[in-house]
Each structure stands twice: as structure tokens, then as C-alpha cells.
Amino acid sequence: MNYRYVVQELRHHRHRTLVNMLGIGVGIALFVAINAVSAAYQEAVSLPFKSLGTDIVVQRPEKRSSDSAQPPVSMRGIRLPFSNQLLSPDDLNRIEAIDGIDSSASALLLWEFGQSGFRTIMGVDGSKPSLGPVKVKDWIREGRFPEKQGEVLIEKHYAKFIHKKVGDHLEIGGKNHSVVGLLEIREGAQVASANIYLALSEAQSLINEGPGGVNVIFLRLKSPSLLGSVKTDLVRKLTGVSVTSSDSFMELMGGVSKISDQFSLLASIIAFSGAVFLITKTMLSNMVERSREIGVLRAVGWTEKDVQRQLMGEAFLQCLLGGIGGILMGYVLSYLLGFLSVPIAAPWETSLLPAFAKNAETAAQSVKLPVSVSAGLSAVSILLSLAAGGLASYAMGKRIAKVKPAEILRQL
């Protein structure tokens, strides 16, 4: 193969070369963008768990609310949520005995119904700084985390709604508490998005159920591959509990998720096939223009394989440059698509709000798609562009084999 001749030929036919590169580039750009968005959608669904450093959330629904539609006797004051009844010490021991669990953290979620409205309260265990709702420490915008009895941390939007700031006092369960900090919940962390946060022991004292009362367990696994087996063990060993993980969010999205996966695969195939068809058709049509050139090359001693290798080099170089350009275009397109937001609805078990609450729609938060182009996706894109060059070269090789130099030279 004469590499200098390859470069000169591509430079001489700039328009034809740019059309071929643009064709493969557009196909690769669409392939990159579609697959990047599909992967970002999958990651967005898992954000509620990743933001808390957890893999599984364990809760126990209220028996009477799951057996009948009968409402609770009273909704006034502080009470346990329907989906978060207390877990017994035996339950906690059974959880800790399950193989595959790396660490766990407990929390106590409460609802308070008063004359001024409804609010959620989260008692946080500060002994596990990287797991569960204690991660809200990282999201404090003003002040600090509660360190002793009588101190609370407030979500900043709720603080604005009730006109409270750091240093003010807030009444909870008939007792005054000092506001020591404001926080902003990270996007997608609705599993831990309460109005008020305080120490776990402080929350336990509000319901008079004795020390040790918790109703939400956050679990981190030793390996993501153990998710299925651990969930099975939890359901088998703990009667009446609900076990939620990121795949529960995926199940909630149902058909949307499946359609997204199928659409991304179909659209990627169409985009790549279109690029291959365009570049192959363009190169084959150019064979007519280059028939005299090929005839001369064959007449001066070039063999059929020499000509085929030369054209193959041109096709591969165009596809390589087009693939690189396509990756860059796909990166720009993916970056722009990253400004889109998708609604992520929380399963009923992990929703902190009752279905009849006025602001229950906050259980479904919109998160920006975390779109990015991975090195693996870029590598696959380059391989696909080279595969397109290979297919185009194969088609041209078949065409060259039918060319008879004597017939071409008679036309000169």
C-alpha cells in the first residue's frame, strides 16, 4: 500500500472525502449520544441509593394499612408512617446475620400532623458517617449538624416556608428545639428528603416507644452481585418487611425503562447501518469515476490485490477520521442532552410522604441526566467506524474483481 498515494488521493477529492467522513461521523455521533443517554437514564434511576451510599433499604409496613383500607384511629401529633413501623431487636439481629452485608445504618422516620400542617422528621444515627441519611451532613449549607438534645437541622426550602433560620427555635412534639443548621438535599436523594433532622435518640424520645426504636435500615453490600441473594434472604428471614433497592425504581418505571433500552438499541443499529450504507454507496459510485485510474494502475503492473489494498486504505482512513469526528460530535450532543431532566418516582415504601399529603408530588423528583461518554463507548465507536470501513472495502473488492483492464483501456 502506498500511504502517500492514499493521502494525496483523499486531498485531491476533498469534497468526496468530506462527504464520506461526514456520513460515518453522523452515524457514530448518533450511536454515541443515544447510548450515553440510555446509560445516563439507568444511572439516574439509581441516584436515590447512590447518593446515600446504600444498596438496600429495609422497612416494615403497618399491618392494618396493608390488610384493609381502614384509616388509623388518630392522625394528630407525631406518629409512625404507614410504611415505616418499628423493627424489633430480633429483626436487626437477623439482618446483621445475613451473609453479604458489609455495613448497616438505622434511622427513625416520623410524621407530625398539627394545626399548622404536616411535616416529616428523620432521626439520624451519626455513628455511620458514610451510609444512610447521615450523608446529609455533606449537604449542609449553613450552620452544623445537631450534636446534642434539643438541636435540629432543617431542609432549607422548608425553613423558608416556615420562616425559620439558624438560631431560631422550632416546636416539635410540644418541645422547643434550636435550629443549628440548614441543608439542601442533593438531587435524587428523595429517600432521605425529610423536613427536619435530629439525633436518633432525640427522635426516639418523641414517640415514647422506648430506646432503640428504628424503622428504616440502610444496608451496604460487600458486592453488587450479591443484591439478589441478600434480598431473598431478607424477605425469607424477616416476616412482613419491604425490601427496596435501585432495581425497585427500575421496576416502577416498568415499560418506560424497557422501551428506553429497546429504542436505544434499535436507534443505534439504524444510525450505524445508515452510516455504513452512505459511505459504501458513495465509494461504490466513485468507482465509476476512478475506473480509468484503476485501469491504468492495472496496466502498469498493479495487481488486483494492490488496488484493493489501496482503496481499502482510503476507506479505513476516512472511517477512522470520521469516527473520531463522530465521537467529538457525540460528546457535544451528549453534553447538551445532559441539561434534560427526567422524573424519578419513589416506590410507595420509600416515600416519606403520605399519599394524601398536599405536597406528595415531591416523592417524584426530576433529576438531570448524568450524561457522559465513557472510554469504553468511545472505543466501541472507533471499532464500529473501522468495521464500516471494512464493509465498504469488502464491497469495493467485489467490484474491483469484476473490472477488466483491457476493456477500460480501450475507452481511453
Image (tube, rainbow, N blue to C red):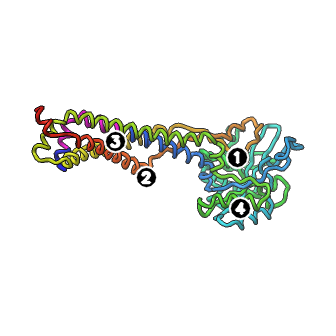
Q: Look at mark 2 in the image and give the residue it sits on.
A: 376
Q: Look at mark 1 in the image and give the residue it sits on.
A: 194
- Residue 203 in the magenta stretch? The answer is no
Q: Residue at x 81, y 41 (%)?
A: 113
Please tell me in which quadrant of the rendered image residue 355 appears: top right
Observer able to see residue 297: yes
Q: Look at mark 4 in the image and give the residue it sits on.
A: 233
Three-letter amino acid code at the position of disc 3: Gly
Label 3 and label 4: CA atoms lie apart by: 50 Å
Circles 1 and 2, Cβ within 8 Å, touching? The answer is no
Q: Earlier in the sequence, mark 3 or mark 4?
A: 4
Three-letter amino acid code at the position of disc 4: Asp
Q: Secondary structure at mark 3?
A: helix
* Vertical arrangement, residue 223 with respect to residue 408, above or below: below
Q: Which residues are magenta?
A: 7-26
Q: Secondary structure at mark 1?
A: loop
Label 4 and label 2: CA atoms lie apart by: 35 Å
Label 3 and label 1: CA atoms lie apart by: 46 Å
